[in-house]
Amino acid sequence: MIPKPTFEVIEPDFGHSYTYQQFDEHNPNKIGVWHYHPEIELVYVNGGSGKRQIGSHVSYYTDGDLILIGSNLPHCGFTDVLTGNKNESVVQMKQDFLGNDFFKIPEMRKIQSLFQIASGGVAFTGSTKKKIGEKIEIMEYQTDFQRLLSILNILNELGNSKEYQVLNAQGFSLQTEVKDNDRINIVFNYVKTNFKEEITLEEISDLVSMTVPSFCRYFKKITNKTFVQFVNECRLVHASKLLAEKPISITEVCFESGFNNFSHFNKSFKAFTGQNPSEYRNELKSVLQS
């Protein structure tokens, strides 16, 4: 069964202009499919490691994550039962949540620039991740007004930080029409569910009622990647996750990730991560044990 693309409707509680949620093992974040929404989303994962899938970017994070996701940028959940994180905090707000012109005043120029960068998805690292992550978690105990001030303070600090990576650095030009959102979400959700199997261009094109040449042009235009490249990256990120979390052989990792040729898997993994699978696993062990 094909997962339907999800448009997430985010309605703040009455009397609020933003939403703040915190999840843990007793109250897990259940949004696992690709979805999108007009709200900008700030996510802090306290500890743990897992998959990061935002736009056409897929990667594996360790030691928690701090991500800012722009408006209508498709993404999926960052935590699951195997992530091993303490908790996950999510702040969501529309770009104009404080009025149409609020972020146009001179004092907000750093935040305005931040929102522009966030259109490609941003992962923050180093001391920024730790410091801002703590501030986001403290919001759990603040009043509504204190939270609002915290959001502004956090956004301003992120706007001044140099410790970040734009995830879709080569561009992800998702147009705002619902039809385009739905189409790319059908593709992303299908790949997310079926990447372990062979996915032909014919079947994925049929899925979105396009010819193969039209689909290839469309996918490359939006993601700046070929479809085959995107599927392989999904497989390689899953392999990274298995190497970190499962005590299985590298051969098993290869086939569990959808590759049917071990030498091709080794070559692709090294090109993607800079290390062969055994080097990657050994380095990750030393990082997680330190």
Image (tube, grey):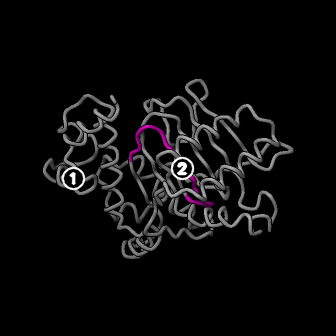
Q: Of residues 222 and 159, which is closer to you in this image?
A: 159
Q: Residue furthest right?
A: 15
Q: Of residues 218 and 38, which is closer to you in this image?
A: 38
Q: Of residues 265 and 115, which is closer to you in this image?
A: 115
Q: Amino acid at mark 2?
A: Ile
* Identity of the residue drawn at 73% across and 31% down: 141
Residue 114 image-quadrant placement: bottom right
* Identity of the residue drawn at 74% across and 64% down: 107
Q: Tell me where residue 35 appears, x and y as whole percent.
A: 57, 52
User: Which range is magenta?
Assistant: 60-73
The answer to whether the residues at label 2 and label 1 have Cβ atoms under 8 Å apart is: no
Q: Determine the secondary structure under disc 1.
A: helix
Neighbourhood count class around disc 1 (C-alpha, 10 Å): few under 14, some 14–19, many 20 upward? some
Residue 109 image-quadrant placement: bottom right
Q: Pointer 1: what residue? A: 270
Q: Pointer 2: what residue? A: 67
Q: Is residue 157 shown in magenta?
A: no
Q: CA distance from mark 2 to mark 1?
A: 26 Å
